[in-house]
Structures are given as structure tokens and as C-alpha cells.
Image (cartoon, rainbow, N blue to C red):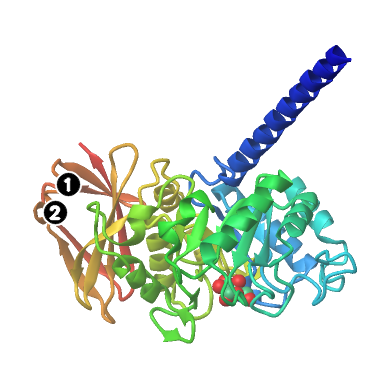
């Protein structure tokens, strides 16, 4: 009897111990899984296309497929634009009886899974939009309280990229809300780039590195130079915010110090090719987004894009600045107020990218005095003009250039 009791006590003790070990292991696993975003997904800034800037709620399956076909034909896919992202308004206004998100059958008659499959077969990755609040910004169902369910839906559909907005979040804590969705995505098990779209309200650059792969730094972009209205701003206004938001603490001004492989400042989707920008402004916008290592998500109508616009978006030498493996974001080192400014970005092979932006309303004759930037460029470099695609001598003597209003001179310096 005693033996039996002892035996069963020992046994139950063992069981208890092994149960406890199991619980501890599960807890450790949960703790590990809670502490992770999917690593290795955005080692360079994501590139792709998003429907919002041009189409807002006028999206549908055919538009997305036509866009993908255009991007395959016009060189965008080959240039690296791999994510095709549908933004707000893709779903029905209500969840189904089981609480699942449902695609609008009029806009997406084949369903989202079929669309993702089709894009995958064409060589693209597929992205979708959600919101951390009760509703999206356009009033469709948000994921608050449905995070794990929605993450499972996205994973089952073959989603590769989630842009996650911040409307109707009430008093939610941003870090906590984005962490919940990160954990839900992780639990769903499909590697998904997590794009934090919280507009910079809660300084995501200070906490988002462990949570997402990119984080918006401002309200919405608009296709103008520096206009500002409601929550929208022109690209120059966003750029000024990027520069001014935080004083230099590690020798790099602005928000650039927070970016690097796996986590990027998102200066918002591109307006390149949209009606409110001149060709010069499209070129500067694109160059500066490359310089600050912002994701390059095109936002124009690919079906009517002119050859000049595709030439801008597919300029390999500019894209190479953005996709440099070291991922050091550029900074502004010189400003001649209302005339021009100089941005620099170090590259992994020891080269430097240098961009001179004419911020004035007139054409400017600019002289770049290399010796005045001696601390940054102590050596002698040969100079390549990345838009003209030609070599321009070296830094032994000042560089003289004429730059049209709102246009840029983009250079790559290579040590001689
Ligand atoms: C917010 C985002 C935009 C876009 C819209 C959709 O304004 O910042 O990028 O996604 O919502 O409603």
C-alpha cells in the first residue's frame, strides 16, 4: 500500500514536473514568439506599388492584374518593385457571421486568395491593408479584437505584406496595439512584412524596430511640392519633417539614425508620375526617397505612365542608393535657405551618394565646393552624374552645375 502510494506520488510528482516543464517550455516559446517580428524580410527598403495614392476606393481585381501586367512589361518588376499592395476599401463593410473579414465580391469576384495566387505566379508578392482600430480610415472593419483571426486569414490568403493603419483606435496604446498584431502575424506562421502606418504620432522610430519592418513618419503624402492641408503634405514638407524631427545624436541628423536593415522610416508612398508634380519634382522626390532609405512604393497609374516616368522609377543607379546593403539613411549636410540643399549618403563600397536639390522657384547655378565638406569627403573622388548617366571629372576642383527649379543633381562619388 505504502509502496503503491509512494509509487503513485512519485509518478504524479514526475507527471507534475513534466507538466510544469511543458508549461515552462510553452511559456518560453510564447515569450520568444512574442518577442519577434519576422527577421530577414526587409533587409533593404521594400519596393512595390500601392493602390491608394491614385485610386483610393476605386480598386478592383482587374485594375490590380492590369497594373501587375504593366509592371512586368515596363521593367518595374525587374527593377525590384515586387510588392503589389491593395489599400483601404477592399473588404465588405461587415464581417461574416463567424467574424471573418470578407473581400468585396463586386470588386474582387475571384477572392483575395485567387488574386494573391495570380500575382505570385507572375513573380510578385502580395500586400493588403488593415487597421489597428475599430474601423479603417474609410470606415471598413478594423482588426481591433480580431487580430489573431485576421492574421490567420491573411496568412491563408497568401499575403506577404500588411500595411496596418491607425484610424479609430481611440485610447489604444500604439506600441501595444502594433505588438499585438506582430504577435498575431507570428502565430499565424506566414512571413509577412509588417508596415506600421501610425503617421509618426507616437514616435514609432523609437520603439518600432522590434515590431515592424517600416513605420510611417508623417501624415499622408500629396502630389505637390510642399503644400500642406489637413493631414496631407507635399514631399518637400515631409522631407523637412524627416530632417527636423530629432536633432543629431550620433552625427546623423534627423530620423535617419533610426533606420537600417530590417527597419525603415517610411516617408509614405511615391507620388512620382502623379498629376500634381512636374517631371523635375518627380525626379527629386524619387531621388530623395532613395537617399533617405524610404521604401519605394510607386503610387501612380501604371496603365498610363509615360516613358519619362518609368525611366525615373527604374533608374538603376538611383535605386542602388536606396537598396545599398548597409542601409545607412542619408542626411542633409548643407542648406542655402530657399536656394538649394545638399544631402549625402554613405554606401557599402566606400562610395558616397550626394544630391543637390534646388529648393527655389528659379533655376540655380550651383558650385559644390568639395573642400568645404572635407570632414565628410577627406579623399579625392571621381564623380558620376546619375541622372545624366555620365562621368563629371573629380572632386579636385569645385563642381559647377545648373539645376532647374525643384530639380536635383544626383551624384555618386567613388574614391580614386
Ligand atoms: C490613411 C493612410 C493612407 C491610406 C488611407 C486609407 O490616411 O495614412 O496611406 O492608407 O488611410 O484610408
The residue at 66%/61% (across/down) is 85
- Viewed as shown, does residue 234 lie left or right of 3? left
Task: State which quadrant residue 180 falls in.
Answer: bottom right
Q: Residue at x 53, y 52 (%)?
A: 211
Could you say whether the residue bearing mark 1 is in a helix, strand or loop? loop
- Residue at the location (26% across, 80% down)? 362
Q: Residue 20 location, x and y as percent? A: 70, 32
Q: Is residue 275 above or below residue 391?
A: below
> CB of mark 2 within 8 Å of CB of mark 1?
yes
Q: Quadrant of the N terminus?
A: top right
User: Does the rendering let one see residue 310?
Assistant: no
Q: Secondary structure at mark 2?
A: helix
Q: Badge 2 is on which residue? A: 373
- Closer-to-camera residue (178/349): 178
Quarter of the image with the C terminus is top left
Ligand 1 lies in quarter: bottom right
Q: Residue furthest top?
A: 3
Q: Is residue 306 above or below residue 119?
A: below
Q: Nearer the viewer, residue 220 or 119?
A: 220
Provide the residue designation for mark 1.
377
Give percent across and percent down for residue 349: 32, 36
Tell which of 196 and 405 is nearer to you.
196
Few, some or many residues within 10 Å of mark 1 (<14, 14–19, 20+): some
Query: Residue 368: percent from the left, percent from the top?
Result: 16, 60
Q: Residues within 10 Å of mark 2 (few under 14, many from 20)?
A: few
Which numbered tag is attached to residue 334? none
Residue extending farthest to the front is: 2
Q: Residue 310 is drawn in which quadrant? A: bottom right
Real-space Cα distance between discs 2 and 1? 6 Å
Amino acid at each position: 500500500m505504502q509502496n503503491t502510494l509512494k509509487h503513485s506520488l512519485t509518478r504524479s510528482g514526475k507527471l507534475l514536473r513534466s507538466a510544469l516543464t511543458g508549461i515552462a517550455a510553452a511559456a518560453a516559446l510564447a515569450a520568444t514568439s512574442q518577442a519577434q517580428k519576422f527577421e530577414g524580410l526587409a533587409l533593404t527598403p521594400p519596393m512595390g506599388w500601392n493602390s491608394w495614392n491614385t485610386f483610393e476606393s476605386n480598386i478592383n481585381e482587374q485594375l490590380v492584374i492590369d497594373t501587375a501586367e504593366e509592371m512586368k512589361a515596363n521593367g518595374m518588376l525587374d527593377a525590384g518593385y515586387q510588392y503589389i499592395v491593395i489599400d483601404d476599401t477592399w473588404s465588405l463593410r461587415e464581417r461574416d457571421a463567424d467574424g471573418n473579414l470578407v473581400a468585396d465580391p463586386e470588386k474582387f469576384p475571384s477572392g483575395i486568395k485567387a488574386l494573391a495566387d495570380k500575382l505570385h505566379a507572375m513573380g510578385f508578392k502580395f500586400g493588403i491593408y488593415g487597421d489597428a482600430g475599430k474601423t479603417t480610415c474609410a470606415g471598413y472593419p478594423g482588426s481591433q479584437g480580431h487580430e489573431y483571426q485576421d492574421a490567420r486569414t491573411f496568412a491563408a490568403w497568401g499575403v506577404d505584406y500588411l500595411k496596418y493603419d491607425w484610424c479609430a483606435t481611440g485610447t489604444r496604446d500604439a506600441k501595444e496595439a502594433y505588438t499585438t498584431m506582430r504577435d498575431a502575424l507570428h502565430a499565424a506562421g506566414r512571413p509577412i512584412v509588417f508596415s506600421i502606418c501610425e503617421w509618426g504620432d507616437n514616435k514609432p522610430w523609437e520603439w518600432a524596430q522590434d515590431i515592424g519592418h517600416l513605420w510611417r513618419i508623417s501624415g499622408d503624402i500629396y502630389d505637390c511640392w510642399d503644400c500642406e492641408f489637413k493631414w496631407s503634405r507635399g514631399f518637400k514638407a515631409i522631407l523637412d519633417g524627416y530632417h527636423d524631427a530629432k536633432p543629431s545624436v550620433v552625427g546623423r541628423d534627423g530620423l535617419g539614425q533610426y533606420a537600417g536593415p530590417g527597419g525603415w522610416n517610411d516617408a509614405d508612398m511615391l507620388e512620382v508620375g502623379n498629376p500634381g508634380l512636374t517631371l523635375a519634382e518627380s525626379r527629386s522626390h524619387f531621388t530623395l526617397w532613395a537617399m533617405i532609405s524610404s521604401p519605394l512604393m510607386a503610387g501612380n497609374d501604371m496603365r498610363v505612365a509615360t516613358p519619362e516616368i518609368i525611366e525615373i522609377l527604374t533608374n538603376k543607379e538611383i535605386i542602388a542608393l536606396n537598396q545599398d546593403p548597409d542601409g545607412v539613411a542619408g542626411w542633409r549636410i548643407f542648406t542655402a535657405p530657399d536656394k538649394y540643399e545638399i544631402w549625402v549618403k554613405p554606401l557599402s563600397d566606400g562610395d558616397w551618394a550626394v544630391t543637390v536639390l534646388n529648393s527655389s522657384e528659379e533655376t540655380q547655378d550651383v558650385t559644390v565646393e568639395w573642400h568645404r565638406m572635407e570632414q565628410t569627403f577627406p579623399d579625392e573622388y571621381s564623380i558620376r552624374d546619375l541622372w545624366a548617366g555620365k562621368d563629371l571629372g573629380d572632386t579636385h576642383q569645385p563642381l559647377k552645375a545648373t539645376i532647374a527649379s525643384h530639380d536635383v543633381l544626383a551624384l555618386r562619388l567613388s574614391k580614386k
